[in-house]
Image (cartoon, grey):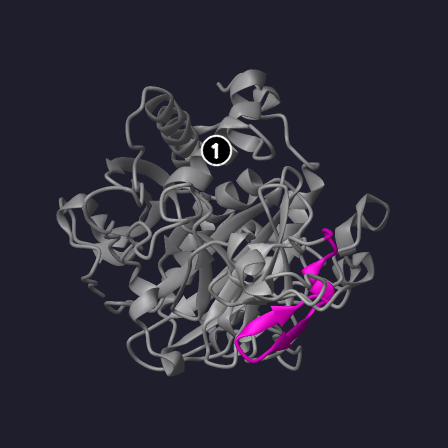
Amino acid sequence: MITREENQRIARVEGDAPMGCLMREHYWIPFALSSQLQSEGDPLQVRLLGENYVAFRAADGRIGFFDELCPHRRASLALGRVEGNGIRCIFHAWKMDVSGKVVEAPTQLVKPKEFCDRVKVTHFPVHEAGGLVWVWLGKAGQSSSSPPHFPDLPFSHAREGNRWAGVSLIPCNWMQGVEGALDSAHVGVLHREWMRGMQNLKSVPQVTTTLQNPPRYETQPTSYGLRAAALRERPEGRTYARVSQYFMPFVTLVPADRPAPNEGYYFIVTPVDDVNHLLFFGYYSERSRKPPHEIGLAAPGVPADPHRFVRALGDRSTRWGQDRELMRQGHFTGFPQNIIQEDVGIQMSMGEITDRSLENVSSSDVAIVQARRTLLKALEAADAGKLPPASARGEAPVQIANPLDVVLEAGVRWDGFSPDRAAA
């Protein structure tokens, strides 16, 4: 069981909260899809770990990531104009270039260049990979041309035509999103409507019927977090193994139900503050990209807006957007938009920050329990001055393997297979 104090320790991220400090000082944090930042387009308002920032793409393609407030009189740069390779505040026309230098300060009439050189602009390194944009908020690397190593993520290597990603702002704590991604036991229950639809797709194997059974879980600690195997028995002594990769603290790689190497889904949960998170949901493949409705994850005819994949959330008074009339017509959950809408509805129903000390966890919750322990141990390591798992401040980039989706013959163990190999 987890105590209330431990629950607060892993859930809270604002201010001096230990988890927020851990995230800032050890991990690259994803904050946007690349498509949300257009060259000389509108500045993007960003909120991470309870603090406000602004991001923009310059004319030469580089991305600037600044404290939201102008260094002059603290007006919001989200109101600013992106001009060439910089952003101009509309209050007094100060301009900062993408590298974080003040290049124009019209209000300074005496030795303006020397004045501009002395002004410090709070800015941060960014890294663009796999259609996502990440920022480094830690002290190490902010004033350096070589920030800490960026991790080697499988989906970062997928070509643009072989991946799809969407993002949504979800009004509940980040840990509820992480645990939803790690929980395979709910798939055959909560997502039964989508499972039936996926069975009709020729590209999806008939393992979807096996997902209706509760799994037996086994986990394995890794240098980057956790491998979690959801094991379900099949006829003739075979076992269907779905092995997810948890790259702490944000990323979970999940098998795509279409056995092939270098293919999977990813869930990335970025804390906006204590009671909101960004959910990045994506699909990657070494074959070809297919939008969500073509692989059974979104309703046909419903636009899959990548900048707002989950829409019409509602609140407790509207049962978080649930359609009860649709349920009376036979739909199991009443969340017809896409498969992620069902997850989000459940996570929001738990409250802004769920009290895990009141849970009665069962045998199929092993992965979730182990993930919590992994995070608590990471906080202990950081408190002791050690590097936590997956820290970007290590000597080399962290490498994460692909998830695994495989039917094992009798007597064969899941941990004997490489995650980059699949068998029918």
- Please indicate whether residue 135 sits to the left or right of residue 144 in the image: right
Residue drawn 41% across the image and 31% down it: 375
Can residue 352 be seen from the camera position used here? yes
Q: Which residues lie in the magenta part?
A: 73-89
Residue drawn 23% across the image and 39% down it: 223
Q: Is residue 196 magenta?
A: no
The residue tagged with tag 1: helix, strand or loop? Answer: helix
Residue 246 in percent (x, y) is at 36, 45
Which of these two is toward me, 223 or 303?
223
Which of these two is toward me, 121 or 239?
121
Q: The C terminus lies in which quarter of the figure?
A: bottom left
Which of these two is toward me, 19 or 10?
19
Extreme residue in the front direction: 110
Q: Which residue is mark 1?
A: 21
What is the three-letter code of the residue carrying label 1? Cys
Residue drawn 69% across the image and 67% down it: 106
Residue 380 in percent (x, y) is at 37, 21
Residue 86 in percent (x, y) is at 56, 72
- Please indicate whether residue 155 sits to the left or right of residue 188 in the image: left
